[in-house]
Amino acid sequence: MDRSITLPQLLDIWSEYIEFRRDQVSPSTYARDYRKVTRRIDMMFQSNPEMTNAQQIRQWLLEQYSNETARRTLVQFQAAARWAVFNDEIAVNPFEGLARYLTSRRKPKTEYAAFTIDERNSIIHAFDELSSFYAPWVKFVFWTGCRLEEAAALRWEHVASNFSEILIQEAEPIDTRILQDTKNYKTTRFPCNKRLKSLLKGMRPNCYAPKARLFYGKKKSRFDYKNFQNRHWRPMIERLVDEGAIAFYLPQKNMRHTFLTHAVDRLKVQDVSYLCRVSEEVLNKHYVGRSRIIEIPEF
């Protein structure tokens, strides 16, 4: 196979491809993920501008980055070159198959792990007692299963005036700060139970603007959930582990997994799918039956 391609050719193809894809991907994907790949091409120019084929580019990526990063980058180059072939800009795809034998990273073992109900309540109690400013955030995510970027995007115009439901239709990743659709482009009218209504009533100021956010940082800036993860969540959870109140440390995003795990035992799978904007396939694969208590007999 002819794998010839110069860096100027690669940059031209990549630039045209991502412009074509701009309206087909989320704004954060374009601004964050595609920009990373563009920077890598720029670094190739600075490091070794004389590269003339895809195998050299592959080797350079492997020398500069982890196998996973190299693999992801080659997958993007392959997609861009495939698009260029379709548009008769090049005759063959020089990157075809080059990512095939690079092992993809496995998801962390805690990816779908959940806290028990008692552990969840202990965490909420700890924030109520020791870090009350952040308690509403912790309660809300635990009780709705919202993705962090979805909760961060919520404004009071998304909450019914009588607190009966919440409209979840947007996401705002903290790294890009770009307001966009939810991950799966799905919208949910999330019904509020008594507990959630009480939380929202306590959160909403007497005088509020519909465009005001539900969650702010202490300095009235947007809520930075990554900063919260490092400065407040991790120390609190590690403290609770040390005290024996919970068994294991899990990151903040596992509040969503906790809701999903316990919801599928109490609601129909199709209802949980709608409430949390996740496919029934994912629910059945990763969550159904996870909260069952298994007693091992002695034998």
Image: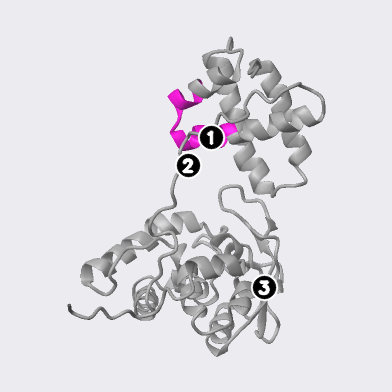
- Which one is earlier in the sequence, the residue at label 1 or at label 3? 1
Residue density around tag 2, few if under 14, some if 14–19, many if 20 or more, within 10 Å: some
Q: Of tags 1 and 3, which is closer to the observer? A: 1
Residue under the image location 58 percent in, 13 percent down: 51
- The single residue placed furthest to the front in the displayed view is 299
Quarter of the rendering containing residue 74: top right
Q: CA distance from mark 1 to mark 2?
A: 9 Å
Left or right of residue 284, residue 87 in this image: right
Residue under label 3? 156
Q: Examine the rendered structure and indicate whether residue 35 appears above or below residue 61.
A: below
- The single residue placed furthest to the bottom in the displayed view is 194
Disc 3 secondary structure class: helix
Checking the image for residue 104, the label placed there is 2
Q: For this rendering, which residue is in front, 121 or 277?
A: 277
Residue under the image location 51 percent in, 71 percent down: 141
Instruction: Provide residue 96's location: percent of width, then percent of height.
Output: 63, 29
